[in-house]
Amino acid sequence: MALLRSVNPIDVGPALYGDGVYLRTPQMADFADWATVREESASFLKPWEPSWPLDDLTRTAFRRRLKRYHREIREDQAYPFFLFRSGDDALMGGITLSHVRRGVAQTCSVGYWIGAAHARRGYMTRALQTLLPFVFETLRLNRLEAACLAHNAASIALLEKVGFQREGCARQYLCINGVWQDHLLYAMLSNDLRPLSAQT
């Protein structure tokens, strides 16, 4: 079960602990490991992501990223996390809750990435499972949305394994790798949340 250590955005944001993984708000000290994972996985990641800015892997761009992250946490707009392996604290990827909407919606979207060396080993499954109690119990949202490319079989399998339900297809939903592409739309509701033992 995920444990919430801190939700103070003035500090480092929430840290969530799961089965062999943990999620923590990005910090400046993460820059070198993050840049290495991203650079080594560039050819693996770019087909599934928006086009990278030319300075994306620089320290200056990372610092700007952190400022945006901390502002979004403070304003309850988004909650970015880096994914770490518990045994050796290796930074493996990232997962972000974005577009938090309150009022009558009470929903947000989730996106994620993982380094090529760590893909298809169950880490992102455990990361999503770790995140769900934070979404539905701590943030008290009612709905968590996700979108993935229609040809991304690994992401489809991941979302369905964790318990997301497919709701439709959005044409030219996001500009990925420089091309407007169709996406499958998934969602999970608060009353869909299952015990972790039932998800494995």
Image (cartoon, helix red, strand yellow):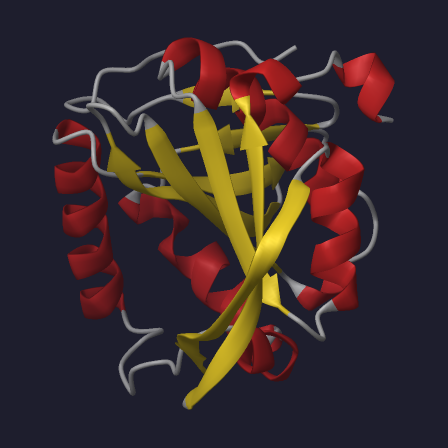
Q: Using the image as rendered, state which of residue 153 and residue 6 is in the foreground.
A: 153
Quadrant of the frame with the N terminus: top right
Q: Please tell me whether residue 119 is drawn above or below residue 25 in the rendered image.
A: below
In x, y percent, where is residue 165? Answer: 67, 41
Q: Please tell me whether residue 52 is drawn above or below residue 145 in the rendered image.
A: below
Residue 33 visible to an observer of this rendering? yes
Quadrant of the frame with the C terminus: top right
In x, y percent, where is residue 33? Answer: 49, 56
In x, y percent, where is residue 168? Answer: 59, 57
In the image: residue 133, left or right of residue 193: left
Residue at the image position 39 percent from the left and 83 percent from the top = 51
Residue 5 visible to an observer of this rendering? no
In x, y percent, where is residue 126? Answer: 71, 33
Residue at the image position 46 percent from the left and 29 percent from the top = 143
Q: Please tell me whether residue 131 is drawn above or below residue 29 in the rendered image.
A: above
Q: Using the image as rendered, state which of residue 76 and residue 5 is in the foreground.
A: 76
Q: Using the image as rendered, state which of residue 44 and residue 198 is in the foreground.
A: 198
Residue at the image position 73 percent from the left and 34 percent from the top = 162
The quadrant holding residue 55 is bottom left
The quadrant holding residue 161 is top right
In the image: residue 157, left or right of residue 91: right
Q: How many marks?
A: 0
The quadrant holding residue 106 is top left
Q: Please tell me whether residue 51 is drawn above or below residue 145 in the rendered image.
A: below
